[in-house]
Amino acid sequence: MERAEWFMCTLDSQDFRKLLVYNGGPPQSRWQEFANGSYEIADVAIGLRNYTGNKDYLLRTRNDVLKYEKRMRLGELPETLCLVMSKGGERMTLFETNRRAVALYLHYFIDSKTPYKEVKGVLGELSGKLALQSQ
């Protein structure tokens, strides 16, 4: 595994909209099935929101995300997201906090009129690109 330097960061609205979801591959990660192969957080969130299929593993993920989003409407927002990025890279990939981040995307940009509040993150800057990074 490559070495990483870890930093605290803050994501403004534009940074958050550019996030990529974790690419762990099945069975750990099936986000691309919601989004026709895309790992863009917007594509995943909208695909998840509109999912009408009957695959159990996708329905479980969808239900988990929608439960998180309901809690967010009640004011329970995640404190920190975990992110990784290649050194010198332009895009951050979610790591460990996909469900909460997708729920936040729905909360701020799709389902709510709630003004965006900057999101804190722990960012691992990697010396090379790992397979878990989507792009």
Image: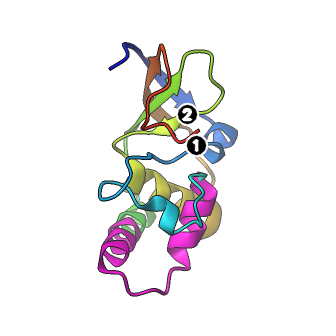
* Dot 2 or dot 1, earlier in sequence: 1
Residue for point 53% across, 42% down:
134
Secondary structure of the residue carrying tag 1 is loop
Q: Amino acid at mark 1?
A: Leu
Secondary structure character of the magenta stretch overall: helix
Q: Is residue 46 found inside the magenta-colored segment of the image? A: yes
Secondary structure of the residue carrying tag 2 is loop
Image position, residue 117 (x, y; %):
57, 44
Is the N terminus in the top left, top right, bottom left or bottom right quadrant?
top left
Q: Nearer the viewer, residue 106 or 124?
A: 124
**Structural crowding at the residue carrying mark 2, measured as other residues with C-alpha within 10 Å and reported as few (<14), some (14–19) or many (≥20):** many
Judge from the rendering whether residue 90 lies leftward or rightward of residue 93; answer left or right: right
Residue for point 36% across, 13% down:
3
Image position, residue 86 (x, y; %):
53, 22
Is residue 77 in sight in this rendering?
Answer: no
Circles 2 and 1 in contact, beta carbons < 8 Å: yes
Is residue 56 in sight in this rendering?
Answer: yes
Q: Nearer the viewer, residue 30 or 110?
A: 30
- Figure quadrant of residue 95: top left
- Figure quadrant of residue 54: bottom left
Image position, residue 91 (x, y; %):
62, 33
Instruction: Estimate the spatial distance between the alpha carbons at disc 2 and disc 1, rounded to whole Å.
Output: 6 Å
**Structural crowding at the residue carrying mark 1, measured as other residues with C-alpha within 10 Å and reported as few (<14), some (14–19) or many (≥20):** many
The residue range painted magenta reads 41-67
Residue at image mark 2: 92
Residue for point 69% across, 40% down:
14
Considering only vertical position in the picture, is 19 above or below 47?
above
| Residue 19 image label | 1
Q: Amino acid at mark 2?
A: Met
Is the C terminus in the top left, top right, bottom left or bottom right quadrant?
top right
